[in-house]
Structure formats: C-alpha cells, structure tokens
Image: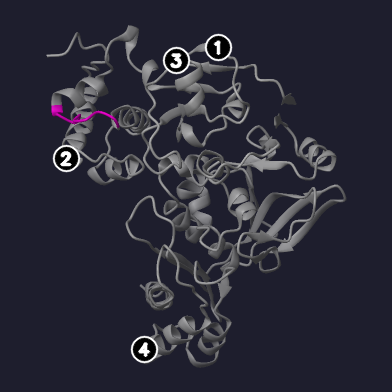
C-alpha cells in the first residue's frame, strides 16, 4: 500500500492515469470506516486534502452560479456567505453527521460514494447542479442527473475525479428536510430538497430509491394546477404529497421500512412546500 | 508532492514532530496516536465517527481521529487531549468537568474535553443550544449530559470574567 499526497489537480490526474485503480481519499468519513470496520485494504491511496484548489469556492456573478470545490468541508457550507447563497445546501450540511464529521466530509466525498442517503445529493438534484469532472482528457461538465447512476455508482470514467460542483443561483425559495432516528449523528431515513421559483417547484428525494429521485410527476402537476404566488390549499398539499410518495421507490432495510420511507418523504415534501410560503 | 510507500513518516503532535515507525501505512490517526506514539488520551470506541471519543484538533478543526488516515496528516498541526493543559496540569475545561461532576466512567471524557476546548476557542459565550450542537458528535452513556453542560457553562463564565484558570492548581 502507498499513500500519495498530491498538491495540485494535475498531480492527482497524473497519479490516477498511472494507477486507475488507486483509491481517492477525501474527508475519510466513508473510506476509513471501511478500513477500520470492514477490512478494506486499498492498495494505493491518493489523499486529496492538500490540493488547495479543491478547498476553495467562488461566485460567478455574470453567470449567476456558485462553484464549490470538491474538497470544501460541509462545515463551511453551514454558515456565512455560502449559506446565504445556497440555503438548502446549508440546511443539508447542518444535518451531516456531527460537527466532527462536517469538519471533514465533503461534496466530493458524497459524490464519490454516491449513496442514495448522501445528505448533499438531493440539493444537487433539485438545484440541477453540474459536476466538473477532470481526467486525462481534460475536464467535462456532467449534470447531476447523469452523474449518479445507481446505489453507490456514478458515471466517472477511469482516472477521472470530481473537481467541483457548480450550482445555479436563483431568487426563489429553497429548503431541505431530513428524517432519521435522532436529531444529530444520523444517516437519512428519507430526505427532500425543494426549490420553488416563480413558475416551478423542483423536488428531489433522498434515501428512497437507488438514486436521488426527482418527483417529476409532482412537479408537473403543481406547475399545471397550482398558482405559485399563493400558498397551497389542503387539497393541493394532499395531491402533491401523494404524487411525491408515488415517485419514491424505497426498500426495507436495517434503517427503516419502505412503507415508512414512502410516508415520510411525502410529509417532508408537503412541509417544505408549506414552509416555502411562510 | 509526497508519496509514501515506506512506513516512516512524521506527525506534528502537540507542537512536537514525532516519527512514526513500524507502522502500516493504512493506520488511522487514532491508532497511530495510541499504539505508535504513546498518546492514549484519544479513545477508540466506535471507529466509525459516531461517538467522538477519539476527537482531536487538526489545523484548528475538531475531527474524529479514527477517520483520519494518519499518513495524510503529515504537515498538519495535531492537538490531542494531552496537549491542552499547561505543563501536564489540568486545563480549565478539565478542571471544570471534575468540579461539575461531568465525569463518571471517564471513557468519553477526553473527546468531550477536546470538543469543548474547540467550541470555546471559537465561541466564548455559547447558548445551551450551541453547546448541545457542538457536542452532538460526542456520546456519553453515564452522565445524561446535564453536568457536562454545567461544566461547559462554568468554564465559559470564568473565562469571560477574566479569571482564565487554565492552570488552576491541583484538584480539590
């Protein structure tokens, strides 16, 4: 086993070209659990914590986007300017593990692991973030919907890695909600990110399917049947919740039952829609 | 760029550069601190970042040392519970935990002490909610947390009143 400590994106690419099977180490909150508890023995590790470029974020005011480096820890998204620009991401970040985990965990790690319960991922889905993927042939932009392809599977090609995530800024409302067995230090049983603009509501569901699910049917129904300028009626909320539940594809596992997850994701989406008018 | 294949590297712990010998390169920082460097203050319990008993401060961030690949922490400033008090004496937070009865079996205590130092260094006047949130990654199965909260508030008050008792002499 070897551990490489590159300091630039180019060095990371070089290392991955030379050894496409190398394991990338971001915040360590997934990989080290596998090493400690599940006997994983990576042969070669490329640690990303010294690549300064990955730990920065910036605003492009002409394009109206925010680009966050894949190595920025969740703690930095919880407060301050990033939280003001992307409140749903801040809310999601605040639900990640504990302060210790948020000081280490990153969006890049969430994307590398690509768990359906990844707390940041519904925000990427609802805001239609774009992922800057770097590899031997330069960089390419991948829509989040095309990035996550299954349970812990993404569309990264050999020797590619995630440099940053770009979020479009909008003037609408955005929020995030999550259910787990307790308030802190919990993996999502179900999670929802909702973004409401003048003419559309985007709803992304976490931990209720093999990938993050956009509730397209619920979104289209709202766009056709709900006047966005006024709060939803009880009937509207009921139908919206039903369509959200219908979009989910949960399973029974050690964390919850499919039935509870389906119920919870509907309630969370209804709450967020109501909250978006308060 | 540094590439390490051999098993010798060094870590900066509590202001000292310490060589790590005879180790497997995949060891966690927790394991290296305890088993290679003779610093058993950080405790190993869950080894998956859920309990906080292994909390250390790396470059001013409180993290779980069980989730840090030790070799990747080269060049970083690591502070453990052993490095918080002056000259081997108790820090004000440690003394306050004793005074308030925030210690029972003691296993979680070092992690709490490190997390509280980190909290108060950044926020000298935390609300109850802020304290609870800052300590939400540290689990104690004995105290019920009430006396831990008391201990944190007592230190915060004494620090703000200027009597920063980092080096309070001895235990009562």
Is residue A44 in sight in this rendering? yes
Q: Is residue B121 magenta?
A: no
For residue A241, above or below residue A179: below
Indicate which disc, 3 or 1, sits on the residue closer to the N terminus.
Answer: 1
Q: Mark 2 sits on what residue?
A: B146
Q: CA distance from mark 2 to mark 3?
A: 32 Å
Position of the N terminus of chain B, as image quadrant, is top right
Instruction: Give the label, 2 or 4, closer to the camera.
Output: 2
Q: Of residues A189 and B134, which is closer to you in this image?
A: A189
- Horizontal arrangement in the rendering, residue A13 relative to residue B76 (left or right): right
Dividing the picture into quadrants, the one containing residue B45 is: top left
Q: Considering the whole magenta stretch, tell me its main secondary structure.
A: loop
Q: Which residue is mark 1?
A: B17
Q: Are marks 3 and 4 in contact (CB under 8 Å)?
A: no
Check the residue under mark 3 and report the chain it is in: B
Q: Nearer the viewer, residue A36 or A61?
A: A36
Q: What sort of colour scheme is used for the picture?
A: one colour
| Relative depth, front residue between B123 and A162 | A162
Q: Residue drawn at (48%, 40%), measured in percent from left and top? A: A103
Co-location on one chain, circles 2 and 1 = yes
**Where residue B123 sits: x, y (%)?**
33, 34
Q: Nearer the viewer, mark 3 or mark 4?
A: 3
Q: Residues within 10 Å of mark 4 (few under 14, many from 20)?
A: few
For the residues carrying marks 2 and 3, which lies nearer the camera in this image? Answer: 3
Residue A266, image x and y in percent? 42, 78
Q: Which residue is mark 4?
A: A233
Mark whose residue sits in front, 3 or 1? 3
- Secondary structure category for the residue under label 3: loop
Q: Which residues are magenta?
A: B100-107
Question: In what element is the residue under mark 1?
Answer: strand
């Amino acid at each position: 086993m070897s551990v490489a400590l590159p300091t630039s994106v180019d060095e990371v690419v070089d290392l991955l070209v030379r050894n496409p099977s190398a394991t990338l180490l971001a915040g360590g909150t997934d990989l080290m659990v596998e090493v400690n508890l599940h006997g994983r023995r990576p042969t070669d590790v490329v640690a990303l914590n010294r690549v300064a470029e990955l730990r920065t974020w910036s605003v492009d005011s002409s394009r109206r986007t925010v680009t966050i480096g894949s190595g920025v820890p969740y703690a930095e998204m919880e407060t301050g300017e990033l939280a003001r620009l992307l409140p749903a991401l801040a809310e999601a970040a605040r639900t990640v593990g504990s302060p210790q985990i948020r000081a280490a965990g990153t969006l890049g790690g969430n994307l590398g692991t690509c768990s359906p319960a990844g707390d940041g991922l519904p925000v990427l889905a609802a805001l239609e973030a774009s992922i800057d993927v770097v590899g031997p042939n330069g960089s390419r932009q991948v829509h989040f919907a095309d990035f996550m392809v299954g349970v812990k599977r993404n569309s990264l090609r050999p020797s590619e890695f995630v440099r940053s995530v770009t979020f479009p800024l909008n003037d609408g409302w955005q929020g995030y909600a999550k259910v787990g067995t307790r308030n802190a230090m919990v993996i999502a049983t179900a999670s929802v990110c909702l973004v409401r603009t003048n003419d559309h509501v985007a709803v992304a569901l976490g931990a209720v399917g093999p990938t993050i699910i956009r509730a397209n049917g619920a979104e289209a129904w709202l766009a056709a049947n709900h006047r966005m300028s006024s709060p939803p009626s009880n009937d509207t909320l009921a139908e919206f919740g039903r369509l959200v539940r219908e979009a989910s594809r949960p399973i029974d596992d050690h964390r919850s039952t499919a039935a509870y997850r389906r119920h919870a994701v509907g309630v969370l989406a209804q709450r967020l829609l109501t909250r978006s008018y308060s | 760029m540094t590439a390490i294949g051999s098993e010798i590297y060094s870590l900066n712990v509590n202001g000292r550069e310490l060589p790590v010998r005879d180790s497997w390169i995949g060891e966690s920082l927790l394991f290296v601190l305890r088993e290679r460097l003779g610093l058993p203050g950080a405790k190993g319990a869950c080894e998956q970042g859920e309990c906080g008993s292994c909390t250390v401060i790396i470059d001013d961030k409180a993290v779980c040392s069980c989730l840090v690949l030790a070799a990747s922490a080269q060049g970083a400033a690591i502070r453990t519970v052993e490095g918080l008090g002056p000259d081997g004496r108790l820090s004000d937070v440690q003394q306050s935990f004793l005074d308030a009865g925030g210690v029972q079996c003691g296993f979680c205590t070092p992690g709490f002490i490190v997390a509280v130092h980190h909290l108060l260094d950044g926020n000298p006047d935390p609300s109850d909610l802020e304290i609870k949130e800052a300590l939400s990654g540290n689990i104690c199965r004995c105290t019920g947390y009430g006396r831990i909260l008391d201990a944190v508030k007592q230190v915060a008050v004494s620090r703000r009143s200027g009597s920063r008792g980092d080096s309070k002499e001895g235990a009562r």
